[in-house]
Amino acid sequence: MTASNSERFLVAFNRIEKALEKMTGSNTYVSFFKLIDFAKKKNAIVRRFEDDLREYGDLRNAIVHHRTAIEYAIAEPHGEVVEKIEQIDRILTEPPVAGGQFRRQVRIFSPDDSLADALRMAGKKKDFQIPVFEDGEFRGLISPSGLMEYLAETVADDVISREITTLSDILRHIHTGRSYEFISANLSVYAAEEMFSDAVVKGRRLEALLITENGRRDEKLIGIITPWDLMKIE
């Protein structure tokens, strides 16, 4: 027999409530709304869906506390509501992580590579974040804004030099601060999204998150996230 919307809703709600209890380490009864308050301090997914969860808490109360018979629910959730709470349940249970969603083979460049070669390669890949390594050691990231900074500093008499420019030359002209952060592969994509928004609030230019297995800069680069990439997140 097909489960009703209220039954599906309550199953997903109870799973979410258990996930919040586990997240907060609660061993005694805590109201669902208090669980949200505690969990959102440490979990980006809860912060992302906080308003939805609070609405679902009210709806659960209407369904459970005001029913007049076991088989009767005073409120029968709309199908879209059920699908949304089931989606949040799945996300909390198996959070999408940076290494899963954005893992890819990253083209690494050397300080001695010419800008022309790097741009040709970037154009083919449609990826204009240029990570520079030397003997396995990270030297820096050349982003579109970093390249513009270099051009602004080196243009003379309205003429851009035709001399062969290396990536090392460009790195020496980037002075506006670090525009990247290293993150671990198991970081939630919602936490990654918050890193960009928090940077904006602080007036910092964060253009890329560089993914390694454990978030260390001495590890192999296994992916890059830009703000544009995060538009895929629901």
Image (spheres, rainbow, N blue to C red):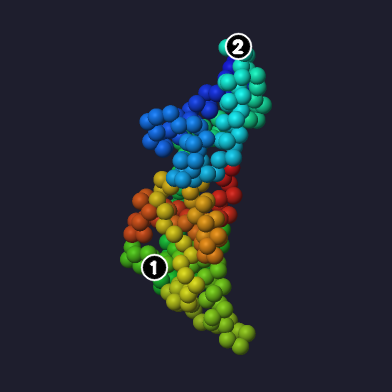
Callout 2: 10 Å neighbours few (<14), some, many (20+)? few
N-terminal of the two: label 2 or label 1? 2
What is the x, y in percent for residue 109? 43, 65
Q: Residue at x 44, y 71 (%)?
A: 113
Q: Residue at x 42, y 53 (%)?
A: 183
What is the x, y in percent for residue 51? 59, 40
What is the x, y in percent for residue 84? 60, 33
Q: Which amino acid type corresponds to the residue marked 2 in the rendered image?
A: Ala
Q: Report which residue position mark 2 lands on.
A: 69
What is the x, y in percent for residue 135? 32, 66
Tell which of 143 and 214 is nearer to you.
214
Where is 102 relative to 202, above or below? above
Q: Residue at x 61, y 19 (%)?
A: 66
From this viewpoint, is residue 80 visible?
A: yes
Residue farthest bottom in this picture = 157
Q: Report which residue position mark 1 lands on.
A: 139
Element carrying mark 1: strand
Q: Quadrant of the C terminus?
A: top right
Q: Which amino acid type corresponds to the residue marked 1 in the rendered image?
A: Arg
Where is 117 relative to 35, above or below? below
